[in-house]
Amino acid sequence: MEKRIISFIEALRQIETMYNRLLELIEDENKAAMVSNVDRLNTIGIEKQNLISQLGRLDQQGTRELLNLADALHISSEDLTVSCLAQKVDSPFREQLLHLQQRLRTVMAQVQHANAQYRMLIEHCLRLVHNSLGYFQHWMDTSNVYGAAGDLSNRRPDSGRLLSGCA
């Protein structure tokens, strides 16, 4: 039983480490976006994808460990959480699990907050680009474009059909 608990605690520690690394990457990504460092953004994107894949695998491992513990403790797997598990095990595992649970909650909240900030930065930049394009749009000369029915379109009211010669 102790071996299973230790294995589960180790999986949680690895998950926590990876979430801390993800938080660092998000902060680096934000800084790279602020200075328009596209190469660094691409590198960070690849690192984040790899890290998220590793997190997924570790999460599956942690879930398997948790289900094994649920079987060993004769607890329904639907009812088993880290808090519930901490109540069912003895010290020092109880304290380790509760402490890890709190640290994981903290780092996950930080990752969510950092992601939200980065998303807002990107959305703001996109709005600036969109508004800038809209501002300069009226300065652009419209070009004639052939439509599907032989129409000539250039957004000017004095344009007409190409074939009919009507204006």
Image: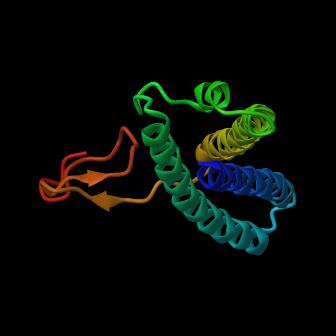
Q: Locate residue 128, reporting x and y percent.
A: 71, 41
Q: Position of residue 149 (x, y in %)?
A: 12, 54
* 33 sits to left or right of 142: right
Up/down of 110 relative to 43, above or below:
above
To which quarter of the image does residue 103 belong?
top right
Q: Nearer the viewer, residue 3 or 58?
A: 3
Q: Is residue 141 left or right of residue 118?
A: left
Exactly how many numbered labels are in the figure? 0
Q: Colour mode? A: rainbow
The residue at the point 49 percent across, 35 percent down is 73
Q: Quadrant of residue 81?
A: top right
Residue 96 relative to residue 122: left or right: right
- Asked if residue 143 is positioned above or below residue 74 in the image, the reply reads below
Please state which of residues 29 and 102 is positioned toward the viewer in this rendering. Answer: 102
Residue 108 x %, y %: 71, 38
Could you tell me which residue is drawn at 40 percent across and 29 percent down?
76
| Residue found 67% across the figure and 30% down from its top | 86
Q: Along the line of sight, which residue is nearer the eye, 78 or 105?
A: 78
Q: Residue at x 43, y 32 (%)?
A: 74
Tell which of 42 and 162 is nearer to you. 42
- Residue 79 drawn at (x, y percent): 46, 24
Looking at the image, residue 16 sits to the left or right of residue 167; the answer is right
